[in-house]
Image (spheres, helix red, strand yellow):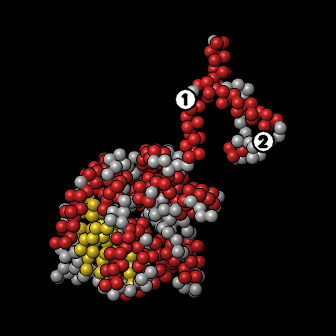
């Protein structure tokens, strides 16, 4: 019997939350991030003012998305680039695949891009016999493991150096004897350098598309992004339509805020702007430049005035890092391209609320995600709105709807509430007197499994309160 996405989530969550090695790796990573993030925020004079400015920029961009995207396209085409508008994942993959086939591409190098993960671009190219190399170190590691990225920013954060050394020994070099990070990176570098200089096509994502300048802004820490976009003769940018921003000057605040929220850095190591194909007199850059603008459900979200601010996301990963649920169950448990709070909000819009409604409940609603979001997306309220949308669209089970109707009836009637409490106290007292505590008949067995049982009161709080008031 095929498992549903919700069943897989619950099963994987139980496994991962009980995996103490995994939990310790994530805890150390998150502790390191927390310290770096706090240090990074201290470098910005007024962090809240910076967040508000980023929110203002993204709100302007999303509310006038059509105008800014057309402006961006006009600038790119004027410099000899090509822009393709893809309505869905199939169209985006088909364009890149057909371009590669037409130009005789056999090897592709990729810089980290969550949109290409979303549309499953690499498998589409590999089915045509085209070799695809992930060149971000974390992405390269999970590619070797045949896994999806674990995290938006740090794809292999769930692995320690020993596990990576074992992987490299099996996949790259049997002679590896050290798990020193510098040695492991040297092995990966040697392998990837061969790919950079043999690839006919480089594929990247985009952190921002700057409308008034017609440039693609990319942030990386490893330099692989520049190699992917400058050495191969063809450069293809695959990006969501929501990545556009109005002005070049907006990068002055967005870049440092992205770096601070993502890794705690003041600015990422490599901040690159690409304006099109190599021009006359320029010594590097691709001879052909293509931008694939991917919709894939984003326009439907844009049409929802209540929740369109979800498109403000700049993919920094801060909400994942702060989320207590993500810290316990990990990124792969979500079973989606975008894990954590932003993924739980976004995925039902992109992939269907029927299959992914359970993600909105994978939250404590503590509000931590909203408090750290650099563009001030009200994430925990959007999780509640997704729950409401699932109920209103009737994708929930009929049994679940009946149970909640009964619960609402009881909770809205003081007399029924009091009767229910009296009935439950009597039933539990009888059950426990028969020695059935902790059995399948005990409704409190899950709660009491890891906690000291709460003594059953002889009367309700309301009855005791009335007595105390009468006595005073």
- The structure residue drawn at horizontal position 80% and vertical position 42%, both measured from the top left corner, is 436
Residue labelled with disc 1: 412
SS class of the residue under badge 2?
loop
For residue 297, what is the image quadrant? bottom left
Expressed as whole percent of the image width and height from the top left, the position of residue 140 reads 47, 75
The answer to whether any part of residue 401 appears in the image is yes
- The structure residue drawn at horizontal position 51% and vertical position 79%, both measured from the top left corner, is 183
> 228 or 116: which is nearer to us?
116
Which is in the foreground here, disc 1 or disc 2?
1
User: Horizontal placement of 318 versus 60: left or right?
Assistant: right
Q: Residue most toward the right?
A: 434
The answer to whether any part of residue 29 appears in the image is no
Circles 1, 2 touching at the beta carbon (< 8 Å): no
Q: In this view, does 97 lie above or below 326?
A: below
User: Horizontal placement of 333 versus 346: left or right?
Assistant: right
Q: Count residues near mark 1 (Cα–Cα under 10 Å), then give few for <14, some for 14-19, many for 20+.
A: few
User: Horizontal placement of 241 versus 383: left or right?
Assistant: left
- The structure residue drawn at horizontal position 82% and vertical position 35%, both measured from the top left corner, is 433
Residue labelled with disc 2: 437
User: Horizontal placement of 85 versus 144: left or right?
Assistant: left
- The structure residue drawn at horizontal position 62% and vertical position 64%, both measured from the top left corner, is 1
């Amino acid at each position: 019997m095929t498992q549903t996405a919700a069943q897989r989530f619950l099963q994987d969550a139980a496994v991962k939350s009980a995996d103490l090695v995994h939990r310790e790796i994530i805890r150390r990573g998150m502790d390191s991030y927390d310290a770096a993030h706090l240090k990074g925020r201290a470098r910005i004079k007024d962090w809240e003012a910076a967040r508000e400015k980023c929110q203002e920029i993204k709100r302007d961009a999303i509310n006038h998305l059509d105008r800014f995207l057309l402006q961006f396209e006009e600038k790119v085409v004027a410099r000899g680039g090509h822009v393709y508008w893809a309505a869905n994942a199939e169209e985006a993959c088909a364009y890149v695949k057909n371009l590669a086939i037409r130009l005789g591409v056999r090897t592709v190098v990729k810089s980290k891009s969550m949109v290409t993960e979303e549309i499953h671009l690499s498998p589409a190219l590999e089915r045509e016999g085209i070799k695809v190399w992930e060149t971000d170190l974390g992405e390269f590691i999970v590619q070797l493991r045949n896994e999806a990225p674990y995290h938006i920013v740090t794809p292999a954060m769930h692995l320690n150096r020993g596990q990576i050394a074992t992987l490299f020994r099996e996949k790259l070099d049997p002679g590896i004897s050290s798990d020193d990070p510098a040695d492991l990176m040297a092995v990966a570098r040697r392998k990837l350098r061969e790919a950079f200089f043999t690839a006919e096509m480089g594929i990247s994502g985009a952190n921002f598309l700057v409308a008034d300048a017609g440039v693609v802004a990319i942030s990386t820490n490893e330099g692989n992004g520049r190699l992917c976009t400058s050495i191969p003769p063809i450069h293809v940018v695959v990006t969501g339509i929501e990545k556009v921003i109005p002005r070049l000057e907006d990068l002055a605040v967005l870049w440092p805020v992205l770096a601070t929220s993502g890794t705690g850095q003041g600015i990422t190591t490599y901040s690159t702007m690409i304006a099109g194909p190599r021009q006359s007199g320029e010594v590097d850059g691709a001879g052909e430049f293509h931008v694939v603008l991917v919709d894939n459900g984003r326009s439907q979200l844009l049409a929802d005035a209540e929740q369109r601010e979800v498109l403000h996301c700049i993919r920094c990963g801060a909400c994942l890092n702060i989320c207590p649920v993500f810290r316990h169950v990990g990124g792969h448990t979500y079973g989606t391209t975008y894990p954590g709070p932003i993924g739980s909000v976004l995925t039902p819009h992109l992939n269907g609320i029927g299959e992914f409604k359970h993600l909105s409940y994978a939250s404590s609603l503590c509000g931590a995600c909203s408090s750290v979001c650099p563009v001030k997306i009200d994430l925990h309220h959007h999780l509640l709105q997704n729950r409401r949308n699932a109920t209103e669209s009737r994708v929930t089970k009929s049994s679940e709807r009946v149970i909640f109707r009964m619960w609402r009836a009881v909770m809205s009637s003081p007399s029924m509430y009091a009767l229910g409490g009296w009935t439950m106290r009597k039933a539990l007292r009888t059950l426990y007197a028969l020695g059935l505590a902790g059995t399948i008949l005990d409704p409190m067995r899950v709660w009491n499994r890891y906690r000291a049982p709460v003594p059953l009161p002889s009367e309700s709080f309301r009855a005791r309160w009335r007595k105390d008031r009468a006595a005073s």
